[in-house]
Amino acid sequence: MEHWSPTTIIDESPPPPSVAVRLARDPKVACAGGFILFLIVLAIAAPLIAPKDPLAQDLLMTTVPPAGFADAAPGFLLGTDGLGRDVLSRVIFGTRVSLTVAFVAAGLACLIGSLLGLLAGFFGHFVDTLISRLVDIWMAFPPVLLSILLVALLGTGLHSVIIAIVVIDWTRFCRVVRTETMGQAQMDYVVAARTIGFARPAILFREILPNVVPVLIALLTLEMGIAVVVEAILSFVGLSVSSDTPTWGGMVAEGRQIVHEAWWVLAAPLVALFATVVAFNQLGDGLARSLDPVLRR
Amino acid sequence: MTAPRLSIEALSAISLRDGDRPILRRVTLAVGTGEVHGLVGESGAGKSTIAKAVLGIIPSQVKVTGGRIDFEGRDLLALSAAASRDVLGRDIALVPQDPSTALNPSRRIDAQMTDGLRLKRGLSMKDARLRARALLEEVQIRDPDRVLVSYPHQLSGGMRQRVLIAAAFGLEPKLVIADEPTTALDVTVQKQILRLIRSLQERHGTSVLFVSHDLGVVAKICDRVTVLYMGKVVEQGATADVLGAPHHAYTKALLAANPRYDRPDTGLEPTPPDVIAALRAEIAAFDANAGTGARHG
């Protein structure tokens, strides 16, 4: 046998920064994440932050324009609506419904959809056929009609909105996760795990799932944006929570009727909606990049 | 040589995709305790199929039609899925071909190395990590602490192969299947890896089934060698005998096809057509005789 000497291995890269550090360095994640954190704080502390009671009407102070415009009244930074309610306070309270729906509905849809997608992609054969056909049939229903139908059946309320969004959007996760899982299941590292004697569920959740997570997170944040919009649509047509809870969609509906006298009643919730959805999308994009072990460096 | 650790007897297999074409023709070979047994042949000769059969990861389009794979008195082909999972990793481990795909890109090295140690050696997380660190030192990795917290893409190909070798031998198996472990590496690294496998194998008394298409590599590391052509054993014996004084025309042709760095003007002869014709006739005669097993199913 040949004699062998120790070899020097050259240190090629500095120690990898932790996930948190890498995320904070990504400008997209930092900005979008910061904005969403800000919204979360607004939603939780709404009663402390909002300058007025969002439901308090003042019929002597209707359609007061925002601060800085002619006829503006002190104390109403974003003006008042047709019933004299403070627009700023209503926008702040509106974050509560929007964020609840974003996190709960998107989270549940993600959980159900990706679990089914993992099973379909990993086990293949009849499991895949069963789940994939179900998704195909499901996706044939027009989503907005389906959600309106569902809410009509379940009755209005936050839980119905959440159920409607989950029922419609789990298929999105299922499809993407299934394809991703199928690709990962072919990889050598999966075979390597089998040769150590790992059982199939262990391989699915320990080996494959971590490689699906970056796509999943991107999709989840995107879905949060979509959930915010769907909730706004349902509020707009009066099928979300009851009208004594301020929602952005509800405000848009009210603002639409008086847009010629008081454009700000429409504009304020629209800007809030727009910024929130953009933030969720950008966050998803940035997270996908930072969490992918191969793309990041 | 005492009783062999692994003994393959008359193993036959067909490809279901390809019109039931035989891919293994009554292959018989034995790997003794502490022996490195080379399995050589051109691509498609059935080397990998034998390795996969031992590991119980035969692809679905391949069907074993006959024979036994005896490992310490048990027929691996007859084991239940659970019994096979138990043997794998504990008694038999794999050093895979391509170190760039055989490690999970999303998991750190420590997680991947401790998996098997915890499952198969019953170590606690803490002990498994200490053991993994010691194993990395044993494969001449200078900065094991950095490597442990690295992701695979942060390591070079040679480093990754060392990690995989450390993981395989670290389970203290009785048999290691090395499936072309140096093919994806450049020549200088190849040499280090071969020495490493040999020294680990000698120290632990491990038997190795070494799959390769490279006679130069086989000559360096193997005690005994089996030459395959189209799934049939062409020649078998001690490495020095087979490669030093080959009996079969095909083995001679394979040796002639090997590059000679000392004599660059000679060598690189393709296998002569008459040798191929003789081999094919031999195989046709074999298939006609032993029609059972080979062209069955």
Image (tube, grey):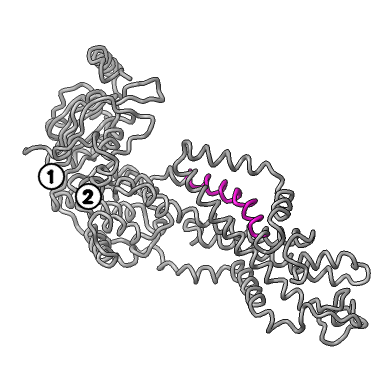
Main SS of residues in magenta: helix
Residue labelled with disc 2: B90
- Indicate left or right for A176 with B7 as reference: right
* Residue at the spot 36% in from the left edge and 65% down from the top edge: B149
Query: Nearest the camera: B246 or B152?
Result: B152
Residue A7 appears at what percent x and percent y? Answer: 25, 59
**Classed neighbour count for the residue bearing mark 1: other residues with Cα under 10 Å, few (<14), some (14–19), many (≥20):** many
**A68, B120: nearer the viewer:** B120
Q: Which label was assigned to residue B151?
A: none
Q: Secondary structure at mark 1?
A: loop
Amino acid under disc 2? Arg
Q: Label 2's element?
A: loop
Asked if residue B262 shows in the view, the reply is no
User: Which region is colored magenta?
Assistant: A161-183
Write down the chain letter for disc 2. B
Q: Residue furthest left?
A: B2
Q: Which residue is mark 1?
A: B34
Mark 2 or 1: in front is 2
Label 2: how many Cα within 10 Å (few below 14, some 14–19, many 20+): many
